[in-house]
Image (cartoon, rainbow, N blue to C red):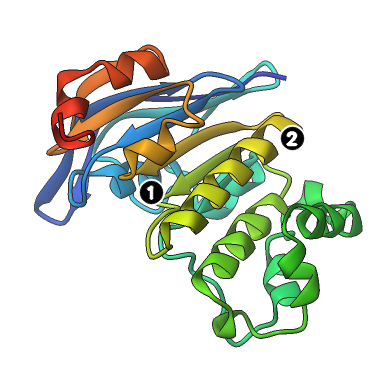
Amino acid sequence: MANRIVVDNVEAGYGTVQVLHGVSVTVEAGETVVLLGSNGNGKSTLINCIMGIVRPKAGAIYLEADGERFDLVGRTPAQIVDLGITLVPEGRRLFPALTVEENLMLGAFRKEARARIEQNLETCFEAFPPLRERKTQQAGSMSGGEQQMLAIGRALMSEPKVLLIDEPSVGLAPILVSRVIAKIRELKERRDLTVLMAEQNFNQAIKIADRGYIIVHGEIAFEGKSAADLQDNDMVKQYYLGV
C-alpha cells in the first residue's frame, strides 16, 4: 500500500523565533529521502512538525496511506504513531534505567503492533544480534552504537509504515555510522518502509538515499531529484565534499 508524506509550505518555530520558512517536502511511497543540513538549519524542527511535537504556524502536513489522506497538523504524537509514522529521535532518547527488552516493549504500544510482539522482537534481535545478548542489560550502560540499534529496534516494534530518523550518526564512530546506515537500508527494503532521514553526514546518507533536500536557514535551498543530482550540486561539493 502507498504511504506518502507531504509537507506543504510549512512555517514553524519556537515562541517568537521562526525556524521554518515555507518548507515543502514530499516523500513518496517506498522512498528513502534525506534531509541534509548543518545544525540549526531546521532539520529536527521539520521532523518534529511531522510527528506533532511542534505545531506549524502555517502550511499543511499529511499522510496518504491505504487510499486515504490524513491531515497531521493538530494531531498528537500518539495519534500520529497510530497512523503508522514512527520516529527514531536524535540522541536516541532511551529509558536508561530500563532493560533493552523493556525499551523494545515500549515501542509496541501501537494497537496494530500488539498482536505481533513476539515476532517483532525476534525481527529486532535478528537485525541487531547484540540486543539479544544484552536484553536484560540496562540501556544506559550500553555503548552509543548499541543504543542506536536499540532506538531503531524500538521504532520497528510499532510496525511503522513511515520511519523518520533524526541524525542517526550523532555521537558514533565512523565505522559504527557506516554499519547503522547499512542496517537502515536493509530494514527499509525488508519491511518495505518509506523513510525520511535527517542527517549531516552526506557521505553516509547518500549511500541509501533515493533523493534528498538541502535545508539552509529554514528554507529548502536545493531539491535533488536523485542521489546523483545531490552529488553533482555545487552546494554539496562545497560544504560536504570539500571540492
Task: Find residue 71 and report its horizontal and vertical position in percent.
Answer: 49, 30
Nearer to us: label 1 or label 2: 2
Residue 118: tell me if it is visible: yes
Q: From the viewer's perspective, is residue 172 above or below residue 13?
A: below
Image quarter in which the C terminus is found: top left
**Front-lying residue, 71 or 31:** 31
Please name the residue shown 51% across and 58% down the image. Answer: 176
Please name the residue shown 48% across and 21% down the image. Answer: 210
Q: Secondary structure at mark 2?
A: helix
Give the quadrant of residue 3: top right
Give the quadrant of residue 20: top left
**Mark before the other along the chain sequence, 1 or 2:** 1
Please name the residue shown 77% across and 83% down the image. Answer: 136
**Front-lying residue, 196 or 187:** 187
Q: From the viewer's perspective, is residue 222 above or below residue 76?
A: above
Please name the amino acid that badge 1 sits on: Asn
Q: CA distance from mark 1 to mark 2?
A: 23 Å
Q: From the viewer's perspective, is residue 240 above or below residue 157?
A: above
Q: From the viewer's perspective, is residue 46 above or below residue 194?
A: below
Please name the amino acid that badge 2 sits on: Arg
Task: Find residue 164 and report its horizontal and vertical position in percent.
Answer: 50, 43
Image quarter in which the N terminus is found: top right
Task: Find residue 48 and report its horizontal and vertical position in percent.
Answer: 38, 49
Contact, mark 1 vs mark 2 (Cβ under 8 Å): no
Looking at this view, name the residue that lies furthest to the left. Answer: 16
Q: Secondary structure at mark 1?
A: helix
Q: Disc 1 marks which residue?
A: 48
- Mark carried by residue 208: none
Residue 161: tell me if it is visible: no
Q: Residues within 10 Å of mark 2 (few under 14, many from 20)?
A: few
Q: Disc 2 marks which residue?
A: 191
